[in-house]
Amino acid sequence: MYHYSELGQVNTREMFKKAYDEGYAVPAFNFVSIEQFNGIMDAVIEKRSPVILLASPNLHKQLGYEMLARIVQSGTDRIRNQGLDIPVALHLDHGMTFAQCVDAVEFGFSSIMIDGSALPFKDNVALTKKTVEYAHRHGVTVEAELGVLSGAEEGGDVGHHESLYTDPGMVEEFAKETGCDSLAISIGTCHGLVKIKANPDGTLPELRYDILEDVMRRVPGFPIVLHGASTIEPRFVDMINAYGGHIEAVAGIPEEQVTKAARMGVCKVNIATDGWISALANTRKILAENPGAIDSRVFTLKNRGLLKEIYLHKIDVMGSAYKA
Ligand code: 13P
């Protein structure tokens, strides 16, 4: 078992305070491969941006705890060896049970999410409060969720089919009762490829900034989180479909809407799908162009470069690059 500081990480408390004060969001990126992890680290080191590494409960099933620890440590070592001061948090994304959160804290995560959003309010409060009491004894910060996002996450863990906007009237009581450190709210973003529908005139609907504003008025300075904020660039959807895949073209969350939310006070924005579809599209294309390939490095190295570009751009969208 590790303590999170041994892995070179920090919890989210100071990160969020700085982000809120300076009007940017800390990028939170899911990773499922070493190339993706390296692409994230390449980008945050170049931009000197804080980062939250999102690991779902499935990721440690895939990699094992030891491997996950070594990967994360390799990233924080790179930062330290270059004499840089870039905060990194390892965060459990969508912990669905108290047991999953305990596992993550014991392993050395510096931050966790307990997602009781599908539960009735009272049960969400009870589960979150219990998790917060446990995590805080270990110096670990806790994100909770109020309101339901539609869409499915990695492995179908988060499979809500309806979107239920957060009721701002419940936020203050929820934050006070549970003691959580940050709160994911539902203002129109969606997980995965189930994104927004265009208006009849072809324009895209706006996120519900009115809900965000109302929430922020009721809990000023409290860190608010946006999940489901991928853009879904059509070029990658087209590439996947051109090289043997079949996915629906959907509209993601326009980048300027994410930037606006970050400037308004959202402290953390989660991105998974944009990383996955870009690397997968590139892999399909490279394999189609190299039918005799027998070594996965034909695509892994190129994917790292592409992912770095994707994450550099996300950091600009969220405004989190170091400003001298
Ligand atoms: P996207 O599916 O929009 O990338 O959102 C990911 C997410 O919110 C992870 O928790």
Image (tube, rainbow, N blue to C red):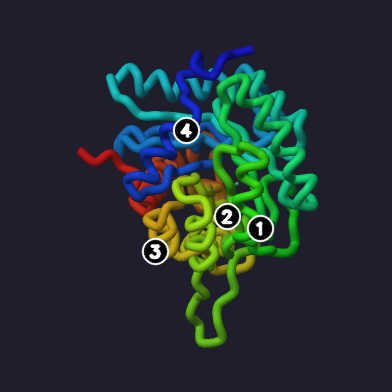
Q: In this view, does 314 lie to the left or right of 282?
A: left
Q: Residues within 10 Å of mark 2 (few under 14, many from 20)?
A: many
Look at the numbered discs 1 and 2 and tell me whether their residues touch, using CB distance below 8 Å. Answer: yes
Which badge, 1 or 3, is on the more N-terminal residue? 1
Residue 165 locus on image (x, y percent): 64, 63
Residue 297 locus on image (x, y percent): 49, 34
Residue 69 locus on image (x, y percent): 56, 20
- Mark 1 secondary-structure assignment: loop
Q: What residue does disc 3 label?
A: 256
Which badge, 2 or 4, is on the more N-terminal residue? 4
The image quadrant where one finds the N terminus is: top right
Displayed quadrant of residue 99 = top right
What amino acid does circle 1 point to?
Answer: Leu
What amino acid does circle 3 point to?
Answer: Glu
Look at the numbered discs 1 and 4 and tell me whether their residues touch, using CB distance below 8 Å. Answer: no
Q: Which residue is drawn at 57% across and 55% down?
A: 228
Residue 276 locus on image (x, y percent): 55, 48
Q: How far apart are marks 2 and 4 (CA)?
A: 22 Å
Choose mark 4 or mark 3, whichever is in front.
Answer: 4
Q: What residue does disc 1 label?
A: 149
Which badge, 1 or 2, is on the more N-terminal residue? 1
- Mark 4 secondary-structure assignment: helix
Q: Does the residue labelled 2 lie within 8 Å of ligand 1?
A: yes
Q: In this view, does 70 lie to the left or right of 63?
A: left
191 w.r.t. 92: above or below: below
212 w.r.t. 178: above or below: below
Q: What residue does disc 2 label?
A: 228
Q: What residue does disc 4 label?
A: 13
Front-most of 134 and 293? Answer: 134
Q: How crowded is mark 1: few (under 14 residues within 10 Å), some or many (20 or more)?
A: many
Front-most of 251 and 183? Answer: 183
What amino acid does circle 2 point to?
Answer: Gly
